[in-house]
C-alpha cells in the first residue's frame, strides 16, 4: 500500500537527485572551463553553486519537517538521515567545482603549462563515482556502493602522480610555480570530489544494511 | 490562501457555573485539516461540539462570543440545526453504526433527504464507501449487519455515512482512540485523502496523530487557546513554551 508519506519521501529523493545532477554538471563544466580556457564558463559554475546551496537548505528543512511530523522509523528514518548527509556531501562537491573554476579562470589568462592528461582522467573517474553512487542510492545497489569505495584509491594515486609531476616542473623552472600550484590544487579538489562520493557510498550501505562502515578503509 | 470557513471570535462557554472555554478566537480554514490538541479538560472537544451545535443537547450550556460558518452566525435562532448538522457532519470516538445493514447505514441520511430511487441511492452509497476506503472490503456483503464489521471498519462505515449526505465539514472527535494501530493508520490515510474535498476538524489526544494528519494545529490548555499555527510550525518551532513542553512530553 502506498502511503501519503511515501510520496513525501519520493519528493525528497527527487530533490536530492536534482542536486546530484547539478553537482556533477558543475564538476564537468569546471573541467571544460579549464581545458578550453573559458573564463565565462568558469564564472557560470560559480553562479550555479548558489542553486546547490539553496537545494541543500530545502532538503534539510523538508527532512526536519518529516522527522517532526511523521515520526519515521527503521528504513524510513535512515532514509531521511542519509538524505540529509548526502545533500551535505553534494553541496561540498559543488564547492570543489567552484574552487576548480576559480583556478581555471586564473589559468585562462596564463600560457598553457603542459597538455593535461591525468587531471581530465581524474575528473572522469570522480564524476563517474558521483553519478554511480547516486544510482546505487536510488536502486539499492549496495555492491556497487562498496565497489566505488575501492575505486577511490585510483583517484588518490592519480592525484599523487600529478603532484609529483608538477613538483618536478617547479623544481626545474620557478616560472611555472603559479600555474603548477593551480593545477595541483585542481587535482586535490578532484580527489576530494571522489572522497565525497566515497562518503555517500558509505551512507548508501548504511541505508540498505543499517551497517556503519565508515572509518574502516584507511 | 482561502478565507476561513469558520470564524470563532471570543467564544466562551459555560456548563452551568463552570466555565469551559475562555475567549477562544481561531479561524478554521477550508479544505484542509485542523487538529485541536491539549490535555484532558482543555476544552478541545467542547469547542469541536460547538461547530455543529452538539452542545445544544446538554442542559445549562451558555455561550458568549461569535461563531460563524461562512459568515453566518450559527447560534442565531433562525438557524436550522438539522440543516447545520447536514453541512457539518461528525464522527465520534466510538463507532456507532445503526443495527442495520451496511447498505442501510450509509443510505440512512440520504433517505431522510428524500432520496429513494434505487439506482441513485446505490450510486451514492458506492461512492461514499469508496471515499471512506471501505468499498473493497464490503462490496460483496452490503446486506450484512454493520455490527459484523471490525472496529476499524465500523469507524470507516461511520465516515461513509457522514459523507454520504455531502457535508462541507467533517468533525472527528478522537476517531481512532478505540482502534488498533493498523486500523488507526488506515483512518489517518483516509483523512489525508478526505481533506482534499472536505474541511476536517479533528480532536485527538495523540499528538503524533495531529502531526501526521493535520495542516493546522491548535493547542488548548484549561479552556484557553494557547497557540494555533501551521502544524509544521507547532511541531518544529512553537512560539509558546507551554506548547513546546506539551508536544515534547514535558508537561500535560
Image (cartoon, coloured by chain):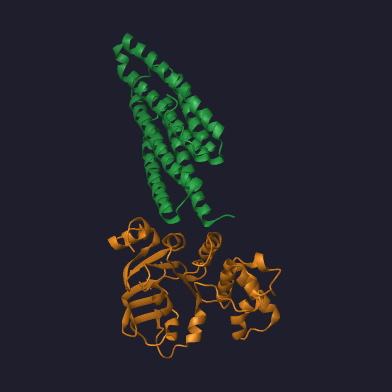
Chain colours: A green, B orange
Residue A114 lies, in percent from the top left, at: 41, 16
Q: Quadrant of residue B27?
A: bottom left
Residue visible at 45% across and 69% down in the picture: B202
Apparent side of residue B27 relative to residue B107 in the rendered image (left or right) = left
Quarter of the image for the C terminus of chain A: give it. Answer: top left
Residue B143 lies, in percent from the top left, at: 70, 75
Apparent side of residue B22 relative to residue A18 in the rendered image (left or right) = left
Residue visible at 44% across and 19% down in the picture: A157
As drawn, which residue projects farthest toward the top? A172
Quarter of the image for the N terminus of chain A: give it. Answer: bottom right
Q: Quadrant of residue B121?
A: bottom right
Judging depth in this view, the residue of A127 and B182 nearest the camera is B182
Number of labelled discs? 0
Residue A78 lies, in percent from the top left, at: 47, 44
One can see residue B2 in this view: yes
> Against B116, is B208 above or below?
above
One can see residue A116 in this view: no
Residue B212 lies, in percent from the top left, at: 46, 59
> Against B226, is A56 above or below?
above
Q: Quadrant of residue A111?
A: top left
Apparent side of residue B24 relative to residue B6 in the rendered image (left or right) = left
> Against B176, is B109 above or below?
below
Amino acid at each position: 500500500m502506498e502511503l501519503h508519506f511515501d510520496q513525501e519521501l519520493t519528493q525528497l529523493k527527487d530533490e536530492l537527485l536534482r542536486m546530484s545532477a547539478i553537482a556533477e554538471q558543475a564538476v564537468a563544466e569546471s573541467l571544460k572551463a579549464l581545458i578550453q580556457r573559458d573564463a565565462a564558463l568558469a564564472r557560470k559554475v560559480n553562479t550555479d553553486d548558489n542553486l546547490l546551496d539553496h537545494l541543500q537548505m530545502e532538503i534539510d528543512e523538508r527532512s526536519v519537517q518529516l522527522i517532526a511530523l511523521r515520526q519515521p522509523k527503521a528504513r524510513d528514518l535512515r532514509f531521511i538521515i542519509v538524505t540529509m548527509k548526502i545533500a551535505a556531501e553534494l553541496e561540498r562537491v559543488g564547492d570543489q567545482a567552484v574552487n576548480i573554476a576559480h583556478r581555471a579562470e586564473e589559468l585562462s589568462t596564463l600560457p598553457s603549462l603542459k597538455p593535461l592528461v591525468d587531471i581530465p582522467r581524474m575528473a572522469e573517474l570522480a564524476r563517474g563515482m558521483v553519478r554511480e553512487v547516486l544510482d546505487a542510492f536510488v536502486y539499492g545497489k549496495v555492491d556497487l556502493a562498496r565497489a566505488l569505495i575501492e575505486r577511490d584509491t585510483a583517484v588518490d594515486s592519480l592525484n599523487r602522480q600529478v603532484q609529483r609531476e608538477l613538483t618536478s616542473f617547479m623544481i626545474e623552472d620557478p616560472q611555472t610555480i603559479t600555474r603548477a600550484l593551480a593545477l595541483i590544487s585542481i587535482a586535490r579538489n578532484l580527489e576530494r570530489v571522489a572522497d565525497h562520493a566515497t562518503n555517500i557510498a558509505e551512507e548508501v550501505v548504511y541505508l540498505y544494511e543499517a551497517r556503519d562502515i565508515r572509518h574502516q578503509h584507511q | 490562501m482561502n478565507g476561513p470557513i469558520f470564524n470563532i471570535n471570543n467564544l466562551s462557554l459555560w456548563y452551568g457555573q463552570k466555565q469551559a472555554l475562555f475567549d477562544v478566537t481561531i479561524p478554521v480554514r477550508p479544505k484542509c485539516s485542523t487538529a485541536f490538541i491539549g490535555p484532558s479538560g482543555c476544552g478541545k472537544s467542547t469547542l469541536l461540539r460547538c461547530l455543529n451545535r452538539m452542545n445544544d443537547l446538554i442542559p445549562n450550556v451558555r455561550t458568549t462570543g461569535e461563531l460563524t460558518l461562512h459568515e453566518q452566525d450559527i447560534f442565531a435562532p433562525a438557524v436550522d440545526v438539522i440543516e447545520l448538522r447536514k453541512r457539518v457532519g461528525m464522527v465520534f470516538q466510538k463507532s456507532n453504526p445503526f443495527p442495520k445493514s451496511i447498505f442501510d447505514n450509509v443510505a440512512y441520511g440520504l433517505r431522510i433527504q428524500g432520496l429513494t430511487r434505487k439506482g441513485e441511492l446505490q450510486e451514492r452509497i458506492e461512492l461514499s464507501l469508496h471515499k471512506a476506503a471501505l468499498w473493497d472490503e464490503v462490496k460483496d456483503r452490503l446486506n450484512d449487519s454493520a455490527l459484523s464489521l471490525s472496529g476499524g471498519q465500523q469507524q470507516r462505515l461511520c465516515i461513509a455515512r457522514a459523507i454520504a449526505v455531502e457535508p462541507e465539514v467533517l468533525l472527528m472527535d478522537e476517531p481512532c482512540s478505540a482502534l488498533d494501530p493498523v486500523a488507526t493508520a488506515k483512518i489517518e490515510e483516509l483523512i489525508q485523502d478526505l481533506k482534499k474535498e472536505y474541511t476536517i476538524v479533528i480532536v485527538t489526544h495523540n499528538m503524533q496523530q495531529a502531526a501526521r494528519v493535520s495542516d493546522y494545529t491548535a493547542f488548548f490548555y484549561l479552556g484557553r487557546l494557547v497557540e494555533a499555527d501551521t502544524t509544521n510550525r507547532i511541531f518544529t518551532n512553537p512560539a509558546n513554551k507551554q506548547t513546546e513542553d506539551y508536544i515534547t512530553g514535558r508537561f500535560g
